[in-house]
Image (cartoon, helix red, strand yellow):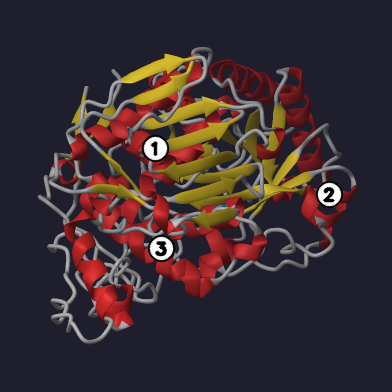
Amino acid sequence: MSVKVTFAITAANTPLGAVVVSSAPTAAPDPLDAGTAPHRADEPARHADPAPPVLADRAPAAPELARAAAQAAGDLLAPPSPVRLGDVVPAPEQVTPDPAADFTLLPEAAIRVSTDAGALAVGEQLAALLRPATGYPLPVTDAARPEPAGGIALVLDDDPGLGPEGYRLDVTPAGVRIGATTPAGLLHGVQTLRQLFPAAIENPTPVAERWALPGGSITDRPRFAYRGAMLDVARHFFGVDAVLRVIDHLARYKLNHLHLHLTDDQGWRIAVDSWPRLATVGGATAVGDAPGGWYTKADYRRIVAYAAQRHITVVPEIDLPGHTNAALTAYPELAPDGVAPPPYTGTEVGFSYVDPANERTYDFVADVLGEVAALTPGPLLHVGGDEAFKVKGTAYTGFVERAQRIVAGLGKTVVGWHQLAPAAHADGRVLQWWGTDGADPVTADAVRRGARLILSPGNHVYLDMKYAPDTPIGHDWAGLIDVRRAYDWDPGTHVADVPAEAVLGVEAPLWTESVTSLAEIEFMLLPRLPAVAELGWSPRATHDWTAFRERLAGQGRRWTAAGITFHRAPEVPWPADEPATAHIPAQVGTPTTTA
Ligand code: NGO
């Protein structure tokens, strides 16, 4: 019998009604500058005082002429877009506003896309993002050389300067043009465009709003090639729908890797045909006797495909040789004493391991990694390697070196937690550094031998850490991580004696010992995930906490409109209608168990 957990999500579908947003100043306009004085989108255009009568015996003064001109212009002036061109997270590389070039999307607009299956798929995603709130049909058509023509053009360009993920976005009175060399670049441009619309664009149902965009150009590309988040589905199990929603959050902030921590002491979450009891027995449990569950191969493929459509690569982790109690309950022959341990539903670490001295262990490793590799189109396979406290010295390095060879034999590149460092180098291997002290000579030495790093410093980006002492869930072993702490560090220089070129990028792990629902996942991810995303994407020159917190504040209304839970962190200046609170709203995901 298979047990699956699904989540009934209610908050996401709650229509929130019209949200009218404007960041334009509301101070009285300067009459000399009446032609450009901003006013709110929901107010009638302001008019300057009536011009005084012109006396026949003198020429009109300059202020009088200005007033007359302003009055003549009157309602013909379109209000400016409520969003500024630079109000984007992660911060773009180059922003050139042109206030004279604002554009408003109208009901008859179309999306025109280069003739290419990948570009068309991005066009359809853009349409799906914009249709609910606008209520516009937004047909998607393709052409050899698409033009904005009063709508939006997504164009595959030959511009090597943009790199494989960069894009250029132009907003002009003629429409929007996004150019990129790949569909991935187009999608990143689409995510930027999405943030340039008024926040009400996130509403799931039509809103009466002027869909104005700020004029100008953005040229953008990522600082690091690897930008990721990890979800631990082993301590608590989360169904496919929750994972897909997390993928949406990653895509929104231009992250391109989802690391799934699929196995641990408390549960085994992926079906393996050659060792079926791993899922059926090992998958039945979770922390605190919460419902277990596992992904069938079809479930896993669905996750991989959904991620791939968003240009996100799934990195599966099978944690070895420690963190394996669930596997040992299913196959006691792998345990050092050959005896099945009891299922484990607590939160301690470091006590379990598969026997590195038993040849059968390597059959298990090869079979499991082989099946997972076959399901995974991405190049990376994560073998864990953390906290195997009972497998020491050469027993540990010997095990790791065999596991690394097995991964290479499958045509994949091995990733492991940085505890793998003392083992021999394997071609291309990647270490995920989760230390809390950047002085780490063992890791630096592995880098000298050829390893590259993904940075997940525990005291900056472990999103299972509490924000503050009163955060209702989470750990604090690596300290408290408020938004500023998540943001204020530099992946390029963080680990001593590791050059920036050896840093592949950043990843924010969310361990789930205390996280039990989709609402709690979102509460821990937001607003810290965008901070980590910005470290991975934006050039260091844009790094500025004061500017970041302002831009981040603008995301709050978007999350609210979309029904996404987030922590209203007090250090972020949320708009006045977003009160600062630190509670998790009532559970939005109620686990239901089906046989
Ligand atoms: C550690 C440990 C995990 C815990 C996590 C909790 C790593 C790589 N191993 O990180 O098993 O869940 O801390 O913060």
Q: Which mark is residue 447?
A: 2
**Is residue 343 shown to the viewer in this render?**
no
- Density class for disc 2 (Cα within 10 Å; few <14, some 14-19, many ≥20) is many
Residue placed under numbered mark 3 in the picture: 552
* Image coordinates for residue 532, horizontal then vertical, percent: 53, 56
Quadrant of the rendering where the N terminus is positioned: top left
Regarding mark 3 in the picture, which secondary structure is present there?
helix
Disc number lying in front (3 or 2): 3
**Is residue 534 shown to the viewer in this render?**
yes
* Image coordinates for residue 96, horizontal then vertical, percent: 54, 55
Name the quadrant containing residue 268.
Answer: top left
Regarding mark 2 in the picture, which secondary structure is present there?
helix
Residue placed under numbered mark 1 in the picture: 174
Q: Amino acid at mark 3?
A: Leu
| Picture residue at 60% right of the left edge, 27% below the top | 157
Regarding mark 1 in the picture, which secondary structure is present there?
loop
Name the quadrant containing residue 428.
Answer: top right
Q: Is residue 429 left or right of residue 304?
A: right
Quadrant of the rendering where the C terminus is positioned: top left
